[in-house]
Image (cartoon, helix red, strand yellow):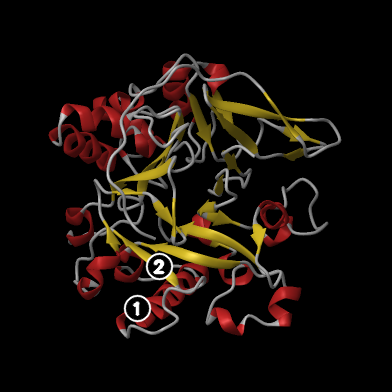
Amino acid sequence: MSNTIKYYPVCNGDQSLITLEDKTTILVDCNIREGAKGDDDETLFDAHSDLLDSIQKDANNIPFVDVFILTHGDQDHCRGFKNNFYQGDPSKYSKEDKENKLIRVDAMWFSPMIAEQHNSNDDETAYQEEAERRLELHRKNHSSRNDPGNRIRIIGYDGDKKYNDLDKMRSVPGDVVTRFNDKEQDTFSIFIHSPFKEQLTSATKDKNHTSIVFQARFKEKKADTDFITLAMFGGDSDHYTWETILDKTKKSGKDKSEQALDWDIFLSPHHCSWSFFNDRPYDDNKVAKKTSLEALDFKRGSNPKVIASCRKIVSAKPNPPHDAAKKEYVAKVGDSNFLNTTVHDVKDETPQPIIFEISKNGPVKAKKVEGSSRAVAGAGLGALNTVSSYGGTI
């Protein structure tokens, strides 16, 4: 089995699944629409059923993801969390929970931004409440705090210092995490770019502005100093965030900036919104920021890919997605390397996930065999480089 990244077709929303060679799974956001489950609407991809088919089950036949990373709490990034993922003491997972196909989250990544801003939807509230339950176990040094289903990592700082007593469980921008669900990885790591302290402590706190931004790093062998694939995830981060990312990363040193900003696959922030390039509305801010264009210039190889997790992009409103943003991406990577999840892989009117297998030559887009879920290799993305860094926990 090879490492893979799967980008789900969930209209204007995000759901991505990283699966490692040892079957470790890292879910980045979710947008599970009830209308797509079962046979209610065959034109909507059933992201919940596919997720169940893509993850492991434990000795008690309970489905689980190793890590859930919620980049921020907007509905289109956490829709379905309350109804599709188990919340509460993992030892109390019941027969009814199994019948409802609830997925256990072995380890959560939690940004303090969720707790510091009024919860805007039930799924965001459920995520925060589950995080608080786990954090309290760690505060009390409870014997079950490190059990699967109780693990948690804080990402970034918190303005009101509510979690200062849990700093040993915190990862901040510049950290490289190599341990996932209490298991050390030799050939996979995550470099954390944001949120930054000043974003979380500012008087005006914006969820998009404080999204978790990270770079997923794949190596072929443990001893390698080069990465075979680098994939960037940025939630709904905007051009202000990326200006700060570039500035801070460059100041950290040339070598570090070259490794941390490079990418082979770039998930376009905020569903191909113009907000990555400039303020909205577009009519008043038609010139893309130099820093945003520079971030895209860190692409590697001959065929870098931009993924737009959004509805079909047209020239008319609304935004997102925005046709002008698509044109900026296409200018950097070419039309064939810009992939829109809603229209790129469609079978019987239903969009299918965009899947990349991580080969020694880089990411390889998998192709669906007609009438089968089996994937076959497509064309690689070219030669790569960069250097690894230190490890983290959880």
- Badge 2 marks a residue whose secondary structure is strand
Q: Which residue is mark 1?
A: 138
Query: What residue lies at 44% left-to-right and 64% top-to-bottom?
Result: 108
Answer with left or right where residue 60 lies relative to residue 142.
Answer: right
Answer with left or right where residue 256 lies relative to residue 307.
Answer: left
Answer with left or right where residue 194 lies relative to residue 350.
Answer: left
The foreground one among 17 and 239 is 17
Residue 374, by quadrant, is top right
Residue 20, by quadrant, is top right
As shown in the figure, which amino acid type bears the numbered disc 1? His
Q: Are marks 2 and 1 in contact (CB under 8 Å)?
A: yes
Q: Which residue is mark 2?
A: 152
Residue 235 spot, x, y in % from top left: 42, 47
Q: Residue furthest right?
A: 371
- Badge 1 marks a residue whose secondary structure is helix
The foreground one among 146 and 363 is 146
In the rendered view, tell whether residue 65 sits above or below residue 219: below
